Amino acid sequence: MKGRVLGLISAEVPGHPGVSGATKAAALFGLLVTSPGFQCTKEEVAACLWPGEERPDDRLYRVVSDLRYRLGEEIVPRNPSGVCAIRPPEGSVDYVRFREGVERAERLWGREQGPGECLDRLV
């Protein structure tokens, strides 16, 4: 899988249609890969994708099903617990690689300094 959320949201998986642009499936992909543990409750997803609307359950299930179709069940597993989750392969999402790079940089420079202070030292 090749996933991008820094810029235009898209995800490509060989053998599947993938997602891109301003679709609900792409929005759900972006929400899940930027959430802790790559998961959100159904309520969190509904509040993000359909703010202010009550009980968009049918639409939520359709979007999750569409994302599963577009990326595959290995990436978007069925989850009866009321939690929407995604399992991106390690290193496959730009945002995750970026966050890991920031964390490595902070460890190299010491936790007492933030990334901005590290950049100041380099300039």
Image (cartoon, rainbow, N blue to C red):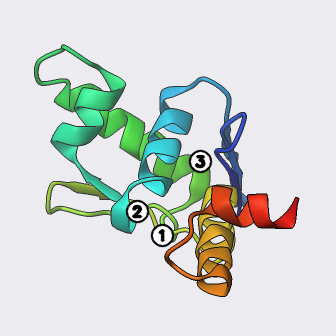
In the image, what residue occupies the spot 51% across and 71% down? 74
Residue 113, placed above or below residue 69: below
Instruction: Say which of marks 1 and 2 sits in front.
Output: 2
SS category of the residue bearing label 2: helix
Percent position (x, y) of residue 38? Answer: 40, 62
**What amino acid type should be assigned to the residue bearing mark 1?**
Arg
**What amino acid type should be assigned to the residue bearing mark 2?**
Phe
Task: Identify the residue under disc 1.
Answer: 87
113 or 23: nearer the viewer:
113
103 or 55: nearer the viewer:
103
CA separation, marks 1 and 2? 7 Å
Nearer-N-terminus badge (1/3): 3
Where, by quadrant of the figure, is residue 104 drawn?
A: bottom right
In the image, what residue occupies the spot 67% across and 28% down? 21
SS category of the residue bearing label 3: helix
Circles 3 and 2, Cβ within 8 Å, touching? The answer is: no
CA separation, marks 3 and 2? 17 Å
Residue 48 horizontal side relative to residue 10, left or right: left
Instruction: Say which of marks 1 and 3 sits in front.
Output: 1
- The disc placed on residue 38 is 2
Residue 17 horizontal side relative to residue 111, left or right: right
- The disc placed on residue 70 is 3
CA separation, marks 1 and 3? 14 Å
Percent position (x, y) of residue 51? Answer: 26, 18
Circles 1 and 2, Cβ within 8 Å, touching? The answer is: yes
Does the image show residue 14?
no
